[in-house]
Amino acid sequence: MDYINEARVRLQDQVPPYRYLDQELVTALNIAMLEVGRVRSDLVVYKLKALGQIQSFILNPFTNAPDNTYVDLDPQFRGALVNGICGFGMTREQEDFGDARATAFLNMFYQGLIGKGIGPVVGGAGPGGR
């Protein structure tokens, strides 16, 4: 699923063994979709394929990996949804440094849904910084 792959890029988790399991990221996607329905119900209310329900996802039962199920959301909200996956995925961690990053991702998720401009993610040392 492209959303999971893009989330792995933003989470800097592209080398196996992955820090975030596929199931954790799919769960984060499902939580983010529920939030899309709560915050912007207009984006999901007319989705007849899901019979009025919020679309949800599971791992492919044969490969135990994310499949290519189409995420029925306008493409302009793709970046916001990926930020939501990252934010909700990171909130499951027990490490303190992840809290600030998770909050930043969740803020970008909500701002992207309501159409506010998204500023740069700040904090941490840049290249060559201490």
Image (tube, rainbow, N blue to C red):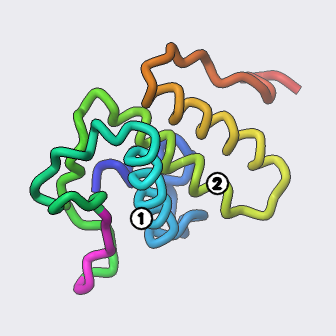
Q: Tell me if residue 15 comes above or below residue 10 in the rendering.
A: below
Question: Circle 2 is placed at which residue position?
Answer: 90
Residue found at x 58% / y 53%: 88
Question: Circle 1 is placed at which residue position?
Answer: 26
Image coords of residue 41 (percent x, y)? 34, 42
Residue found at x 29% / y 36%: 42
35 relative position to 78: left or right = right
The range drawn in magenta is: 56-62
Image coords of residue 75 (percent x, y)? 24, 33
Image coords of residue 72 (percent x, y)? 20, 48
Mark 2, secondary structure of its residue: helix
Q: Tell me if residue 12 comes above or below residue 107 in the rendering.
A: below
Inspect the image, locate mark 2, and give the three-letter code of the amino acid beneath it: Met
CA gap between label 1 and label 2 equals 13 Å
Q: Tell me if residue 52 comes above or below residue 129 in the rendering.
A: below
Residue found at x 16% / y 45%: 46
Taking the view exactly as shown, the residue that stands out farthest to the right is 130
Nearer the observer, 42 or 12: 42
Q: Is the magenta stretch mostly helix, strand or loop?
A: loop
5 relative position to 76: left or right = right
Residue found at x 38% / y 47%: 37
Nearer the observer, 38 or 112: 38
26 relative position to 57: left or right = right
- Residue 45 highlighted magenta (yes or no): no
Nearer the observer, 118 or 33: 33
Q: Mark 1: few, some, or many residues within 10 Å (few <14, many ≥20)? A: many
If the image is split into quadrants, where does the C terminus sit? top right
Inspect the image, locate mark 1, and give the three-letter code of the amino acid beneath it: Val
Image coords of residue 66 (percent x, y)? 31, 67
Mark 1, secondary structure of its residue: helix
